[in-house]
Amino acid sequence: MHNDLTSLLLVVALAFLVPIALQYFNLRVIPVVVAEIFVGLIIGKSGFNLIVPEGWVSQLSTLGLIFLMFLSGLELDVSLFKPKKTSRAILDNLPKDHFKDELSKRKPPNPLLLSSIVFLLIAAVSYGCAVFLQQLNYITEPYLFTIMIASISLGVVVPVLKEKKLLEHAYGQTLLLITILSDLITMILLGVYISMQAGSTESLWLLGLFFVLVFVIYRFAARFMRSRFISRISGGGTAQLGTRAIFALILMLVVLSETLGVESILGAFLAGVIVSLLRPSREMVHQLESFGYGFLVPIFFIMVGVDLDIPALVTDWKIVLLIPLLIGLIFVARYVPTLLLGFWFRFKYASSGGLLMASTLSLVIAAASVAYELGIISAELQGAVILVCVINCLLFPVLFNKQVPRAQGARVRASLIGANHVTLPVSQDLLKDGFDIAIYSADASVGDEQSKQDYGRFPLTVVSDLEADTLLKAGAFNTDVIVFGSMDELQNAKLARKAKSLGIDKIIVRAESPELIQSLQAEAFNVFSTLFASRMLLKGLIQYPSAVMLMTQDDSLQEITVQNPKYNNVQLKELPFLGDALILRIYRGESFIVPHGATQLLAQDRLLVSGSAESIQALKAELE
C-alpha cells in the first residue's frame, strides 16, 4: 500500500511539474502529452525504474485512458458536418473570383464531401502500407495497422489550426473535418475489429446491439436533460447534477461495452459524442477538461512512458528498423492523399496540410495498449508504435508551423444600406477599426464626377434602387452584418425581412415610429432609432458623463475575443503585452467577471478593453 501511494505521489508531482517546465524553458512547441511520456521514460523501465506499475497508479492510468477517449469524443463538433446556412440566391450572385485569396485557387466543393474523399484515400493508402508491413513480416494483422496508420490526432491538429487562425477559412475547416472523420471512423472500426477477434458471429450481433443501446441512451438523455424537473433542480450549488450525470453516463457505457464484449474505450468515446450532441455549456466542458487533462490523463501518459522499455527495443534490430519505416509510411499515407486539396487550395497549403495530418497520438497509443493487452501485438511492437507517435508529434506540427504563416483574422464584413448623415460617418469609424465596409446608395448624384471628390473617401456602391433583387445582385447580402439605415423605414423593414429569409443573422434596422419599432423588435430584429438614441445619449451625458465620454472616445473602448489557444487558462497577470490597455470586464457565456490579476482567461472569453489604440491593437493581434 505504501509503495502504491509513493508511486502515485511521484507520478502526480511530475504531472504538475511538466507544464511548468515547458513554460519556464519556453518549450511550448512540444505537446504536453509528449513531455509526459518522456518523463515516464525517465522514471520507468527505460530509466531509473522508480515506479511500481500496479495498484492505485495502474487503476488510475486505466481510468485516464477511459477519460481520454471520453474527451476525444467530446471534442467532436457534429455541427461542423452541417453546411453553413447560406442562401443559394446569395451564392449564385457572388463574383467568380470571390473565393480566390492567399490560400484558395477556386471555390472548394462541399467540405464534408471533399473531406470524405480525402479520408477514403488515406484509408486506402494506409491499407497498402499495412499490407507492405505484413509482407516484410513485421505484423500479422494488417487491418489493425490500417486503423492505426489512418488515425489522425484531433488533440494535436485542433490547437495548431486555432493558433494559426485557420479554422475560419475553408482550408482549415477541410483539414478539421478530415481529422474528425478519421478520429470517429477509426475509433468505431477499432471497436469492430476487436469484437471480430472473438471469432464468432455472436460478437458482431452484440456490437450491433451495443450501438442500438447507445442510440436509445442518447435519446433518453436528450429528453431527460430537457425536462422541466431537471431544469428546476440543476441550479448548481453542491449538487453539480450535470457533472454527476456525465460520470454516470461514462461508467454506464463502459460497463455496457464490456458486458457485451466491446472494448471499453469505444464506450467511453461514444459517451463523449453523446455529451457533445447534448451541447453542454462551456463552463461544464471546461470543468471536465480540467479534471481529465489536469489529473487522470497525465497519469495515463506518464504510465505509457513508464511501461515502455526502450533498451529492449534497441536489442532487436528489426524493431529499430521498423521505427523510421513506420514514420515514413504514416507520412506517405497522410501526405499523398492530402495533395488532392491542391486542386482547390494553393499547393503550399495543400502540401503543408499533409504534414499536419501526419500527427498521430492518443488513439494510436490507446489502440496499441489495447492490442497488447489482448495479445494481438508484442510488447516490443507496442513500444515501437508509441515511439513513432511521440516522434511524429514532435516533428510534423513543427514542420507545419514553419511552412504556414499565421493567417490574418477574418475581417468582419458589414453592408450599410442607404448613404446619409448617419451611415457615412459610421462607415469611417468602422473602417478605422478594421471592418470591411460597403455602403449602397440609390442616389445617382453620389456617382457624379462632381461628387466623387466629396464622397471618394467612403466605400460607396451606387445602385439603381434599394430593392431586394438589385441589392442581391450587387452583393449587399453577402455579409456578416447588414444595416438598413435609409430614410424610408418601411423599406428598411421590408429589406430586413428579406435578409432574414436569406439566412443573415446580424440585422440592424432603422425605424422611427413606435409601432414599427415594436413590431420589428417582436420579430427579434435589432432596431436603431435616431430619436431614441439621442434621448439615451442626452440622458447619459446628464447622469453619467464620464461613462459616455469613455464609450464615445475614438479607439478607447473595444471588445476582444480570446481565440489563441496559447492563452487558454493563462492568468491576466501573466500577459506580457497589455501596455496601457485595461481589461474592464470579461464576458463568459451569459455572465461577466470583474477581472483581477489571478483571473484565468478561457477560450472565447470576450474582453471589454480600454486604452490607447496601439495597445488595444497589439492585444487584439495576440489574443485573436
Image (spheres, rainbow, N blue to C red):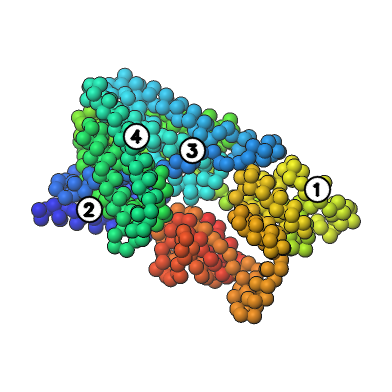
Q: What amino acid type is highlighted by mark number 2?
A: Val
**Corner quadrant of residue 580:** bottom right
Query: Which residue is drawn at the image coordinates 71% and 47% (left, top)?
Result: 476
State the image coordinates of residue 562 (x, y, percent, origin top left): 49, 57
Disc on res. 187: 4
Q: Is residue 546 above or below residue 172?
A: below
- How far apart, in angstroms, are the residues tagged by discs 2 and 3? 39 Å
Q: What amino acid type is highlighted by mark number 1?
A: Asp
Q: Disc 4 vs disc 3: which is toward the camera?
A: 3
**On the picture, is 506 further left or further right than 513?**
left
Q: Is residue 216 above or below residue 618?
A: above
Task: Give the mark nearest the N terminus, 4 or 3.
Answer: 3
**On the picture, is 90 further left or further right than 574?**
right
Mark 2 crowd level (few <14, some 14–19, many ≥20, 10 Å Cα): many
- How far apart, in angstroms, are the residues tagged by discs 4 and 1? 56 Å
Labels 3 & 1 near each other (Cβ < 8 A): no
Instruction: Identify the secondary structure beneath mark 4.
Output: helix
Residue for badge 1: 465
For the residue pair 501 and 195, the one nearer the viewer reads as 501
**On the picture, is 310 further left or further right than 19?**
left
State the image coordinates of residue 293 (x, y, percent, origin top left): 32, 52
- How far apart, in angstroms, are the residues tagged by discs 3 and 1? 39 Å
